[in-house]
Image: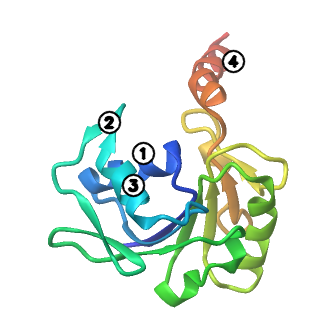
Amino acid sequence: MFKVGINGLGRIGRAILRSNLEKKFFEIVAINDINPDNENIAYTLNYDTIYGRLTNQFETQGASIIQNEGKPIEIFHESSISSVPWEAFEVDFVIDSSGVKKNVIDARKLISEDRVRKVFVTHCPNEVDFTMVLGANEEALDPENHHIISTSICDATAISPVLKVIDDNF
């Protein structure tokens, strides 16, 4: 199973973490968020106005958060994505959901130093290697050359597959 770190635990980062709790796509081993209060981080994961209350709730354990019968997830509070020791947790991929352009620029350092394999960005800055919109251009992804990959923005993600069908057929 891939090991993943999340940089930025706002609305999108929390949604990714909560979705992964249900589906177990990967193992989340480290989180970086500028919020210095781990109790608050656990609380915002446990009680969400949109997604509801978690049945298997997180609690703090030192510098980590943990769910009952789960592995601890180490929490960092660095302002830069490159200041987190992702490699110490054998992170394969970092999901940058911070929305901070400087983190995308600093992500290049993670790749060049072989600290992580790929960085996926949940917004669409110019500094990425590739912007992927599922249903529209994922076949153009070149894993050998694309290491910082944007997952686009919500409106492009919503309309692009429809526009592709129209373009391909008409």
- 134 vs 47, nearest the viewer: 47
Q: Earlier in the sequence, mark 1 or mark 2?
A: 1
Which of the two discs, 2 and 4, sits closer to the camera? 2
Determine whether label 1 and label 4 are within 8 Å by CB: no
SS at mark 3 in the image = helix
Q: Which mark is residue 85?
A: none
SS at mark 1 in the image = helix
**Residue hosting label 2:** 51
**Residue hosting label 4:** 167
* Quadrant of the rendered image containing residue 134: top right
Q: Residues within 10 Å of mark 1 (few under 14, many from 20)?
A: some
Q: Of the residues shown, which amino acid type is indicated by label 1? A: Ala
Q: Earlier in the sequence, mark 2 or mark 3?
A: 3
Which of the two discs, 4 and 3, sits closer to the camera? 3
Q: Earlier in the sequence, mark 2 or mark 4?
A: 2
Determine whether label 3 and label 1 are within 8 Å by CB: yes
Q: Which mark is residue 17?
A: 3
**Residue hosting label 1:** 15
**Does 143 sit left or right of 15 as displayed?**
right
Give the spatial CA distance, label 2 vs label 3. 12 Å
Residue 165: x, y in percent?
59, 19
Determine whether label 2 and label 3 are within 8 Å by CB: no
Residue 37: x, y in percent?
48, 64
Q: Of the residues shown, which amino acid type is indicated by label 3? A: Leu
Q: Is residue 29 above or below residue 128?
A: below
> Quadrant of the image for the N terminus?
bottom left
Q: Of the residues shown, which amino acid type is indicated by label 4? A: Asp
